[in-house]
Image: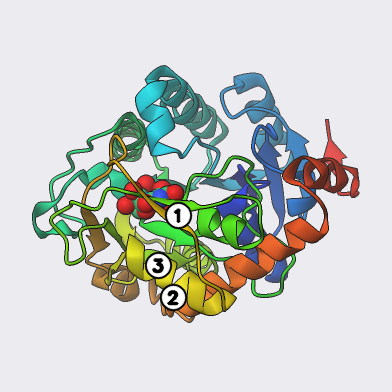
Amino acid sequence: MGTILVTGGAGYIGSHVARQLGERSERIVTLDNLSTGFRAAVLYGDLVVGDTGDATTVARVLRDYGVDTVMHFAAHIVVPESVADPLKYYRNNTASTRTLLQCCVEAGVRHFVFSSTAAVYGIPAGGVASEDTPTAPINPYGRSKLMSEWMLADVAAATPLRYAALRYFNVAGADPGGRIGQSTPAATHLIKVACEHVVGKRDHVAIFGTDYDTPDGTGVRDYIHVEDLAAAHLNALDYLRGGGAPVTLNCGYGRGFSVREVLDCVAAVASRPLTIREAPRRAGDPPTLVAEARLIGRILDWVPHYRDLPGIVGTALAWEWTLTDRGTDDVARTEQAKLSSPVVA
Ligand code: UDP
Protein backbone atom coordinates (compact mmCIF):
# COMPACT_ATOMS: atom_id res chain seq x y z
CA MET A 1 0.00 0.00 0.00
CA GLY A 2 1.20 3.53 -0.75
CA THR A 3 1.22 6.42 1.66
CA ILE A 4 -1.94 8.38 2.39
CA LEU A 5 -1.70 12.16 2.15
CA VAL A 6 -4.05 13.84 4.62
CA THR A 7 -4.53 17.50 3.73
CA GLY A 8 -5.80 19.49 6.68
CA GLY A 9 -4.66 16.68 8.96
CA ALA A 10 -3.86 19.13 11.76
CA GLY A 11 -7.46 20.32 11.77
CA TYR A 12 -10.51 19.01 13.55
CA ILE A 13 -11.86 16.25 11.30
CA GLY A 14 -8.59 15.52 9.49
CA SER A 15 -6.76 14.88 12.75
CA HIS A 16 -9.38 12.36 13.88
CA VAL A 17 -9.16 10.49 10.57
CA ALA A 18 -5.33 10.58 10.65
CA ARG A 19 -5.38 9.24 14.19
CA GLN A 20 -7.59 6.31 13.19
CA LEU A 21 -5.37 5.64 10.16
CA GLY A 22 -2.29 5.72 12.41
CA GLU A 23 -3.92 3.35 14.87
CA ARG A 24 -4.42 0.98 11.95
CA SER A 25 -0.71 1.31 11.05
CA GLU A 26 -1.36 3.00 7.71
CA ARG A 27 1.50 5.13 6.38
CA ILE A 28 0.39 8.76 6.42
CA VAL A 29 1.74 12.22 5.83
CA THR A 30 -0.14 15.39 6.76
CA LEU A 31 -0.09 18.59 4.70
CA ASP A 32 -1.47 21.55 6.62
CA ASN A 33 -0.73 25.27 6.50
CA LEU A 34 -1.63 25.57 10.21
CA SER A 35 -3.99 28.48 9.49
CA THR A 36 -6.55 26.83 11.75
CA GLY A 37 -4.83 23.53 12.58
CA PHE A 38 -2.43 22.58 15.37
CA ARG A 39 0.87 20.73 15.24
CA ALA A 40 -0.07 18.87 18.39
CA ALA A 41 -3.12 17.37 16.67
CA VAL A 42 -0.85 15.41 14.33
CA LEU A 43 -0.37 12.21 16.29
CA TYR A 44 1.01 9.96 13.54
CA GLY A 45 3.37 10.47 10.60
CA ASP A 46 5.14 13.58 9.36
CA LEU A 47 3.59 17.02 9.16
CA VAL A 48 4.50 19.08 6.11
CA VAL A 49 3.63 22.72 6.68
CA GLY A 50 2.30 24.01 3.40
CA ASP A 51 -0.70 24.81 1.28
CA THR A 52 -2.79 22.50 -0.91
CA GLY A 53 -2.86 25.34 -3.44
CA ASP A 54 0.94 25.23 -3.75
CA ALA A 55 1.58 22.83 -6.64
CA THR A 56 5.32 22.64 -6.02
CA THR A 57 4.91 21.51 -2.41
CA VAL A 58 2.07 19.12 -3.21
CA ALA A 59 3.99 17.50 -6.11
CA ARG A 60 7.05 17.10 -3.89
CA VAL A 61 5.06 15.45 -1.10
CA LEU A 62 3.27 13.10 -3.48
CA ARG A 63 6.60 12.04 -4.97
CA ASP A 64 8.76 11.92 -1.83
CA TYR A 65 6.27 9.93 0.21
CA GLY A 66 5.02 7.61 -2.56
CA VAL A 67 1.43 8.74 -2.09
CA ASP A 68 -1.28 6.66 -3.78
CA THR A 69 -4.26 7.96 -1.79
CA VAL A 70 -5.27 11.50 -0.86
CA MET A 71 -7.77 12.40 1.83
CA HIS A 72 -8.61 16.04 1.35
CA PHE A 73 -9.83 17.97 4.40
CA ALA A 74 -8.02 21.29 4.07
CA ALA A 75 -10.79 23.87 3.65
CA HIS A 76 -12.59 26.80 5.19
CA ILE A 77 -15.87 25.70 6.72
CA VAL A 78 -17.79 28.61 8.20
CA VAL A 79 -21.02 29.39 6.32
CA PRO A 80 -21.48 33.03 7.46
CA GLU A 81 -17.85 33.79 6.70
CA SER A 82 -18.31 32.39 3.19
CA VAL A 83 -21.22 34.78 2.70
CA ALA A 84 -19.09 37.73 3.83
CA ASP A 85 -15.91 36.72 1.99
CA PRO A 86 -16.85 34.37 -0.88
CA LEU A 87 -13.59 34.65 -2.79
CA LYS A 88 -11.69 33.32 0.22
CA TYR A 89 -13.82 30.18 -0.11
CA TYR A 90 -13.49 29.88 -3.87
CA ARG A 91 -9.72 30.24 -3.52
CA ASN A 92 -9.10 27.88 -0.63
CA ASN A 93 -11.85 25.33 -1.21
CA THR A 94 -12.26 25.31 -4.98
CA ALA A 95 -9.09 26.63 -6.62
CA SER A 96 -6.79 24.76 -4.20
CA THR A 97 -8.70 21.54 -4.81
CA ARG A 98 -8.17 22.03 -8.53
CA THR A 99 -4.41 22.40 -7.99
CA LEU A 100 -4.35 19.37 -5.72
CA LEU A 101 -6.27 17.30 -8.28
CA GLN A 102 -3.94 18.30 -11.08
CA CYS A 103 -0.96 17.19 -8.98
CA CYS A 104 -2.76 13.93 -8.16
CA VAL A 105 -3.41 13.17 -11.82
CA GLU A 106 0.21 13.97 -12.75
CA ALA A 107 1.52 11.77 -9.91
CA GLY A 108 -0.84 8.88 -10.70
CA VAL A 109 -2.68 9.00 -7.36
CA ARG A 110 -5.29 6.24 -7.44
CA HIS A 111 -7.70 7.06 -4.63
CA PHE A 112 -9.18 10.33 -3.43
CA VAL A 113 -11.47 10.75 -0.42
CA PHE A 114 -13.09 14.16 -0.42
CA SER A 115 -14.52 16.06 2.48
CA SER A 116 -17.77 17.44 1.09
CA THR A 117 -20.78 18.85 2.85
CA ALA A 118 -24.53 18.66 3.24
CA ALA A 119 -24.48 22.36 2.35
CA VAL A 120 -24.48 21.26 -1.33
CA TYR A 121 -28.22 20.49 -0.90
CA GLY A 122 -29.28 23.97 0.15
CA ILE A 123 -32.87 23.75 1.38
CA PRO A 124 -34.09 20.28 0.34
CA ALA A 125 -37.84 19.62 0.24
CA GLY A 126 -38.97 18.41 3.66
CA GLY A 127 -35.53 19.16 5.10
CA VAL A 128 -34.25 15.66 4.30
CA ALA A 129 -31.62 15.06 1.62
CA SER A 130 -30.67 11.80 -0.03
CA GLU A 131 -27.69 11.51 -2.34
CA ASP A 132 -29.88 11.96 -5.41
CA THR A 133 -31.65 15.05 -4.06
CA PRO A 134 -30.80 17.83 -6.52
CA THR A 135 -27.89 19.93 -5.34
CA ALA A 136 -28.80 23.60 -4.90
CA PRO A 137 -26.42 25.24 -2.40
CA ILE A 138 -27.57 28.53 -0.91
CA ASN A 139 -24.21 29.86 0.24
CA PRO A 140 -20.67 30.21 -1.16
CA TYR A 141 -19.37 27.51 1.18
CA GLY A 142 -21.74 24.94 -0.32
CA ARG A 143 -21.01 26.11 -3.85
CA SER A 144 -17.25 26.01 -3.29
CA LYS A 145 -17.52 22.37 -2.22
CA LEU A 146 -19.98 21.39 -4.94
CA MET A 147 -17.61 22.72 -7.61
CA SER A 148 -14.94 20.46 -6.15
CA GLU A 149 -17.31 17.49 -6.38
CA TRP A 150 -17.90 18.31 -10.05
CA MET A 151 -14.17 18.49 -10.72
CA LEU A 152 -13.69 15.14 -9.05
CA ALA A 153 -16.41 13.51 -11.12
CA ASP A 154 -14.98 14.92 -14.34
CA VAL A 155 -11.43 13.90 -13.46
CA ALA A 156 -12.57 10.39 -12.51
CA ALA A 157 -14.34 10.09 -15.88
CA ALA A 158 -11.18 11.11 -17.73
CA THR A 159 -8.44 9.37 -15.69
CA PRO A 160 -7.95 6.20 -13.58
CA LEU A 161 -8.43 8.19 -10.31
CA ARG A 162 -11.36 6.93 -8.25
CA TYR A 163 -12.96 8.84 -5.40
CA ALA A 164 -15.39 8.84 -2.53
CA ALA A 165 -17.03 12.19 -1.81
CA LEU A 166 -18.45 12.24 1.70
CA ARG A 167 -21.12 14.82 2.38
CA TYR A 168 -20.85 15.63 6.07
CA PHE A 169 -23.85 16.77 8.03
CA ASN A 170 -23.12 18.51 11.38
CA VAL A 171 -19.95 17.10 12.84
CA ALA A 172 -19.34 17.43 16.58
CA GLY A 173 -17.77 15.63 19.52
CA ALA A 174 -14.16 14.65 20.09
CA ASP A 175 -11.81 11.70 20.39
CA PRO A 176 -13.22 9.57 23.24
CA GLY A 177 -9.60 8.99 24.29
CA GLY A 178 -9.30 12.73 24.97
CA ARG A 179 -6.16 13.29 22.87
CA ILE A 180 -7.61 15.60 20.21
CA GLY A 181 -10.75 17.62 19.60
CA GLN A 182 -12.02 20.80 18.02
CA SER A 183 -9.61 23.56 19.00
CA THR A 184 -10.57 26.20 16.45
CA PRO A 185 -10.42 29.68 17.96
CA ALA A 186 -13.48 31.86 17.29
CA ALA A 187 -15.58 28.78 16.62
CA THR A 188 -19.09 29.27 15.28
CA HIS A 189 -20.54 25.76 15.39
CA LEU A 190 -23.37 25.26 17.84
CA ILE A 191 -22.10 22.45 20.08
CA LYS A 192 -18.62 23.95 20.29
CA VAL A 193 -20.06 27.38 21.10
CA ALA A 194 -22.32 25.93 23.79
CA CYS A 195 -19.40 24.04 25.35
CA GLU A 196 -17.31 27.22 25.36
CA HIS A 197 -20.15 28.87 27.26
CA VAL A 198 -20.24 26.04 29.82
CA VAL A 199 -16.52 26.39 30.59
CA GLY A 200 -16.86 30.16 30.90
CA LYS A 201 -15.32 31.37 27.65
CA ARG A 202 -18.60 32.98 26.52
CA ASP A 203 -21.24 34.64 28.64
CA HIS A 204 -24.16 33.27 26.62
CA VAL A 205 -25.26 31.19 23.64
CA ALA A 206 -27.32 32.85 20.92
CA ILE A 207 -30.10 31.02 19.12
CA PHE A 208 -30.02 32.25 15.55
CA GLY A 209 -33.66 32.28 14.51
CA THR A 210 -36.69 31.17 16.51
CA ASP A 211 -39.27 31.65 13.74
CA TYR A 212 -38.33 28.83 11.38
CA ASP A 213 -40.97 26.42 10.15
CA THR A 214 -39.73 23.68 12.49
CA PRO A 215 -41.37 22.04 15.55
CA ASP A 216 -39.90 24.56 18.04
CA GLY A 217 -39.03 27.34 15.58
CA THR A 218 -35.25 26.77 15.74
CA GLY A 219 -32.97 25.21 13.12
CA VAL A 220 -32.82 21.42 12.88
CA ARG A 221 -29.60 19.54 12.02
CA ASP A 222 -28.27 15.99 11.88
CA TYR A 223 -25.36 15.92 14.36
CA ILE A 224 -22.80 13.16 13.76
CA HIS A 225 -19.97 12.19 16.10
CA VAL A 226 -16.55 12.92 14.61
CA GLU A 227 -15.38 9.44 15.60
CA ASP A 228 -18.08 7.78 13.46
CA LEU A 229 -17.43 10.22 10.64
CA ALA A 230 -13.70 9.47 10.77
CA ALA A 231 -14.41 5.74 10.63
CA ALA A 232 -16.43 6.29 7.44
CA HIS A 233 -13.24 7.56 5.78
CA LEU A 234 -11.37 4.37 6.61
CA ASN A 235 -14.26 2.37 5.23
CA ALA A 236 -14.17 4.53 2.09
CA LEU A 237 -10.46 3.80 1.76
CA ASP A 238 -11.08 0.04 2.00
CA TYR A 239 -13.88 0.38 -0.54
CA LEU A 240 -11.67 2.19 -3.06
CA ARG A 241 -8.77 -0.22 -2.51
CA GLY A 242 -11.21 -3.04 -3.16
CA GLY A 243 -11.96 -1.56 -6.59
CA GLY A 244 -15.12 0.34 -5.68
CA ALA A 245 -16.49 2.77 -8.28
CA PRO A 246 -16.58 6.52 -7.62
CA VAL A 247 -19.27 7.25 -5.06
CA THR A 248 -20.90 10.19 -3.27
CA LEU A 249 -22.39 9.47 0.16
CA ASN A 250 -24.17 11.30 2.94
CA CYS A 251 -22.56 11.12 6.37
CA GLY A 252 -25.20 11.62 9.01
CA TYR A 253 -27.41 9.51 11.24
CA GLY A 254 -30.73 10.31 9.59
CA ARG A 255 -32.27 12.13 12.55
CA GLY A 256 -32.43 15.80 13.46
CA PHE A 257 -32.21 17.87 16.64
CA SER A 258 -33.30 21.48 16.97
CA VAL A 259 -31.04 24.16 18.40
CA ARG A 260 -33.14 24.17 21.57
CA GLU A 261 -32.88 20.38 21.91
CA VAL A 262 -29.12 20.58 21.53
CA LEU A 263 -28.86 23.32 24.15
CA ASP A 264 -31.10 21.34 26.53
CA CYS A 265 -28.77 18.38 26.06
CA VAL A 266 -25.67 20.50 26.74
CA ALA A 267 -27.28 21.85 29.92
CA ALA A 268 -28.15 18.31 31.04
CA VAL A 269 -24.67 16.94 30.33
CA ALA A 270 -23.06 19.94 32.04
CA SER A 271 -25.55 19.81 34.93
CA ARG A 272 -26.08 23.55 34.79
CA PRO A 273 -28.46 25.94 33.08
CA LEU A 274 -27.21 27.92 30.07
CA THR A 275 -27.67 31.63 29.47
CA ILE A 276 -29.48 31.74 26.16
CA ARG A 277 -30.34 34.78 24.03
CA GLU A 278 -32.65 34.70 21.08
CA ALA A 279 -31.17 36.39 18.02
CA PRO A 280 -32.19 36.95 14.39
CA ARG A 281 -31.65 34.30 11.73
CA ARG A 282 -28.09 33.92 10.46
CA ALA A 283 -27.37 34.51 6.76
CA GLY A 284 -27.14 31.33 4.69
CA ASP A 285 -28.83 28.98 7.19
CA PRO A 286 -31.44 26.46 5.97
CA PRO A 287 -34.26 25.71 8.46
CA THR A 288 -33.78 21.92 8.48
CA LEU A 289 -31.04 19.71 7.10
CA VAL A 290 -31.15 16.00 7.90
CA ALA A 291 -29.53 13.10 6.04
CA GLU A 292 -31.21 10.22 4.35
CA ALA A 293 -28.34 8.07 5.57
CA ARG A 294 -28.94 4.50 4.45
CA LEU A 295 -26.65 4.36 1.42
CA ILE A 296 -23.36 4.75 3.30
CA GLY A 297 -24.13 1.74 5.49
CA ARG A 298 -24.88 -0.36 2.44
CA ILE A 299 -21.96 0.75 0.25
CA LEU A 300 -19.22 1.11 2.87
CA ASP A 301 -20.43 -1.36 5.55
CA TRP A 302 -20.40 1.62 7.89
CA VAL A 303 -21.94 1.05 11.30
CA PRO A 304 -22.09 4.07 13.63
CA HIS A 305 -21.16 3.55 17.28
CA TYR A 306 -21.64 7.02 18.82
CA ARG A 307 -25.13 7.99 17.72
CA ASP A 308 -26.47 9.43 20.97
CA LEU A 309 -26.48 13.20 21.36
CA PRO A 310 -25.36 13.19 25.03
CA GLY A 311 -22.30 11.18 24.00
CA ILE A 312 -21.46 13.68 21.27
CA VAL A 313 -21.91 16.58 23.67
CA GLY A 314 -20.06 14.79 26.47
CA THR A 315 -16.87 14.26 24.45
CA ALA A 316 -17.07 17.82 23.07
CA LEU A 317 -17.39 19.21 26.59
CA ALA A 318 -14.58 17.03 27.94
CA TRP A 319 -12.30 18.40 25.21
CA GLU A 320 -13.37 21.96 25.99
CA TRP A 321 -12.35 21.44 29.62
CA THR A 322 -9.00 20.08 28.41
CA LEU A 323 -8.44 23.26 26.40
CA THR A 324 -9.49 25.36 29.37
CA ASP A 325 -7.05 23.55 31.66
CA ARG A 326 -4.34 24.55 29.22
CA GLY A 327 -5.39 28.21 29.48
CA THR A 328 -7.12 30.48 27.02
CA ASP A 329 -7.33 29.54 23.35
CA ASP A 330 -4.33 31.72 22.57
CA VAL A 331 -2.28 30.16 25.32
CA ALA A 332 -3.45 26.71 24.26
CA ARG A 333 -2.35 27.50 20.75
CA THR A 334 1.13 28.48 21.93
CA GLU A 335 1.44 25.55 24.28
CA GLN A 336 0.26 23.09 21.66
CA ALA A 337 2.70 24.55 19.16
CA LYS A 338 5.51 23.84 21.60
CA LEU A 339 4.61 20.19 21.91
CA SER A 340 6.83 18.19 19.67
CA SER A 341 5.59 16.38 16.62
CA PRO A 342 7.66 15.53 13.59
CA VAL A 343 7.70 18.48 11.25
CA VAL A 344 9.01 18.80 7.74
CA ALA A 345 9.23 22.50 6.90
N1 UDP B 1 -26.66 28.08 15.78
C1 UDP B 1 -27.15 28.89 16.80
N2 UDP B 1 -26.25 29.53 17.61
C2 UDP B 1 -24.89 29.41 17.45
C3 UDP B 1 -24.41 28.59 16.40
C4 UDP B 1 -25.32 27.95 15.60
O1 UDP B 1 -28.36 29.01 16.98
O2 UDP B 1 -24.14 30.04 18.21
C5 UDP B 1 -27.61 27.34 14.92
C6 UDP B 1 -27.52 27.65 13.45
O3 UDP B 1 -28.31 28.77 13.11
C7 UDP B 1 -28.03 26.33 12.85
C8 UDP B 1 -27.53 25.28 13.83
O4 UDP B 1 -27.29 25.98 15.05
O5 UDP B 1 -29.45 26.29 12.86
C9 UDP B 1 -26.24 24.62 13.39
O6 UDP B 1 -25.31 25.62 13.03
P1 UDP B 1 -23.76 25.34 12.98
O7 UDP B 1 -23.06 26.65 12.80
O8 UDP B 1 -23.35 24.50 14.15
O9 UDP B 1 -23.57 24.40 11.70
P2 UDP B 1 -24.05 24.61 10.17
O10 UDP B 1 -25.35 23.87 10.07
O11 UDP B 1 -24.18 26.08 9.90
O12 UDP B 1 -22.96 23.97 9.37
Upstream in the sequence, badge 3 or badge 2? 3
Q: Residue at x 39, y 34 (%)?
A: 80
Could you say whether the residue bearing mark 2 is in a helix, strand or loop?
Answer: helix
- Identify the mark at residue 190; answer none if there is no mark: 1
- Identified by mark 2, the residue type is Leu
Which residue was labeled with disc 2?
309
- Identified by mark 1, the residue type is Leu
Upstream in the sequence, badge 1 or badge 2? 1
Is the residue indicated by label 3 positioned so its CB lies within 8 Å of ligand 1?
A: yes
Could you say whether the residue bearing mark 1 is in a helix, strand or loop?
Answer: helix
Could you say whether the residue bearing mark 3 is in a helix, strand or loop?
Answer: helix
Foreground mark, 1 or 2, reads 1
Is the residue indicated by label 1 positioned so its CB lies within 8 Å of ligand 1?
A: yes
**132 up-or-down from 73: above or below:** below
Q: Residue at x 39, y 23 (%)?
A: 84
Which residue was labeled with disc 3?
262
Marker count (numbered): 3
Q: Residue at x 57, y 79 (%)?
A: 271
Q: Can residue 302 be seen in this view?
A: yes
In which quadrant of the rendered view does residue 137 lie?
Answer: top left
Say if mark 3 contacts mark 1, CB within 8 Å.
yes
Give the position of the N terminus as an image quadrant.
Answer: bottom right
* Horizontal side of residue 324 vs 130, given as left or right: right
Say if mark 3 contacts mark 2, CB within 8 Å.
yes
Q: Which residue is drawn at 28% across and 33% down?
A: 139
Residue 164, percent across and down? 39, 53
Alpha carbon of mark 3 to alpha carbon of mark 1: how far?
Answer: 8 Å
